[in-house]
Image (cartoon, coloured by chain):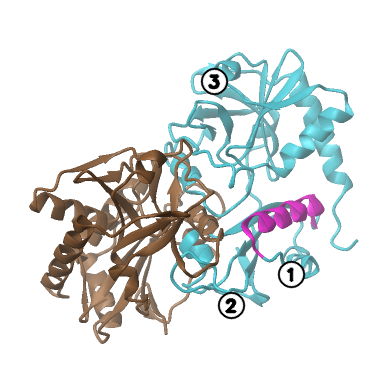
Chain colours: A cyan, B brown
Amino acid sequence: MITSIVNGEEAGVVSPLDRGLLYGDGVFETLAIRDGRPCYWSLHMARLREGCRRIGLQASDEALLREEAERLAGPVGRGVLKLVITRGEGGRGYQVPDTARPTRIVQLHPWPEYPPGCAETGVATRLCHTRLGCNPVLAGMKHLNRMEQVLARQEWDDPDIREGLMQDRDGNLVEGIMSNLFLVKDDLLVTPDLSQCGVAGISRSVVLELAENINLQSRVRHVSLDELMQADEILLTNSIIGIWPVIAVDARGYRKGPITRRLQELLARRKTEGGTWRR
Amino acid sequence: MITSIVNGEEAGVVSPLDRGLLYGDGVFETLAIRDGRPCYWSLHMARLREGCRRIGLQASDEALLREEAERLAGPVGRGVLKLVITRGEGGRGYQVPDTARPTRIVQLHPWPEYPPGCAETGVATRLCHTRLGCNPVLAGMKHLNRMEQVLARQEWDDPDIREGLMQDRDGNLVEGIMSNLFLVKDDLLVTPDLSQCGVAGISRSVVLELAENINLQSRVRHVSLDELMQADEILLTNSIIGIWPVIAVDARGYRKGPITRRLQELLARRKTEGGTWRR
């Protein structure tokens, strides 16, 4: 069952004039709830604040968000919490009316039951035909304009292919549809630069930090298809899956390697550290 | 007053799980209602169908849409009709669930009372800093991912500047935030190619057709900033404004010219021709 609180109201609904609906004018966050507690709450809040700032949207009261999130997610052990902040109701036209008040949505979704093999053995992926358009004013942000991801996800329905990898218009690898991408080559960890497109994931930043802690060299830069093909290890990250090793990109096979394994262990340990509702 | 019909229900609301809200997963149309009748209904329906086809969305029953549109707009002389079709409710995740049923929204908005001078004398515009990302899978479509337009419209609040002109990442002129762009140079009508980004407006297609009718040569192709600067006439089109001459792009002045005047006359005549609720 999925439950939503909209502007404080349980089982609330959204106006057909909401600019989140009409223009995708807003931002969102997706958090893991484990042992009844939100993972990386403060990192998600920081990204939400930054997204609001970038699009000129009044940030939500975080204490209120936390209270509503706890109301939904506190009673459950595991779940996925989704927070959506939109520009709120407007008239017609792109100009933001002075009267607009943000819409605040807190949703609890069931935990997706991926087979344990996804994290243990790894997942098969495909290279998507749908490319990501480049726009620095939107890059990195988790905004509500996600047609590219929707179209990319429509490219296949084989349930054994767990993720699609997306390139930008120049052919650089950017990310998975729902995840960030890392590769390992000669003990160097590389993840694509997201200054032109893509979503800067929270787990991506945590993995970069973990790498630093163990003196694993990492680089954030352009990644070509050739480089992906030549990688020793490929891994995917997001707040729900944690780290998935990639064992195939289309017909090309890869193996789960020692660096992926090490990062998984570190991430699992770090996950169980943090996260309480009240600070 | 704005009224909405959502899936047949007057004053209906939208689920916070609607993919139109969560991903901008849908398309829309904006039509003028004049003398109680919709202008260019069949052209708008054709674009809506094509948009649905491109994103793999089941097209709406047009008789039903027309009936709901008439219910709202039939009693008014003038207004703006907005039709929105989204993918409907989904769970979390980009994959379209088999159970998704499109959400159909019909809205009546008041006619915007632009000063008569906008069409008669012309409007001042500015060149936006916000650029349009390029993606052929989305180009031309009137989809619900409109953050770029929202951000571009936030660049100014001087009410005397009526429109912002947008370039793509390579600097080509593409369109106005809410309108399509034409220029005239040496009796040639030129409008930007929209195969990489932009919305292929209904009025744009009508103006191209009117030009053909009077043997005015036209071209659809890339338009550079230089070419815009050197234009004899610049005009903007959309379903609500019709044709607006541009008299300024930032500090550079332009004059309303004979071709703009001629196209305005032809468009006004054509507008009063068509449009009934029942065929």
* Amino acid type for the residue under numbered disc 2: Thr
Q: Which of marks 1 and 3 is nearer the N terminus?
A: 1
So how many labels did they put on this image? 3
Mark 1 neighbour density, 10 Å: few (under 14) some (14–19) many (20 or more)? many
Residue at left offset 77%, top offset 34%: A207
Read off the residue under disc 2. Answer: A99
Residue A239 in the image, given as x and y percentages of width and height: 70, 45
* Amino acid type for the residue under numbered disc 1: Glu
Does residue A36 lie above or below A149 as drawn? below
Is residue A49 found inside the magenta-colored segment of the image? Answer: yes
Read off the residue under disc 1. Answer: A68
Q: Is residue A81 visible?
A: no
- Dot 3: chain letter: A
- Distance from the alpha carbon under mark 1 to that under mark 2: 24 Å
Residue A198 in the image, given as x and y percentages of width and height: 59, 40
- Distance from the alpha carbon under mark 2 to that under mark 3: 47 Å
Q: Earlier in the sequence, mark 2 or mark 3?
A: 2
Badge 2 marks a residue whose secondary structure is: loop
Read off the residue under disc 3. Answer: A225
**Quadrant holding the C terminus of chain B:** bottom left
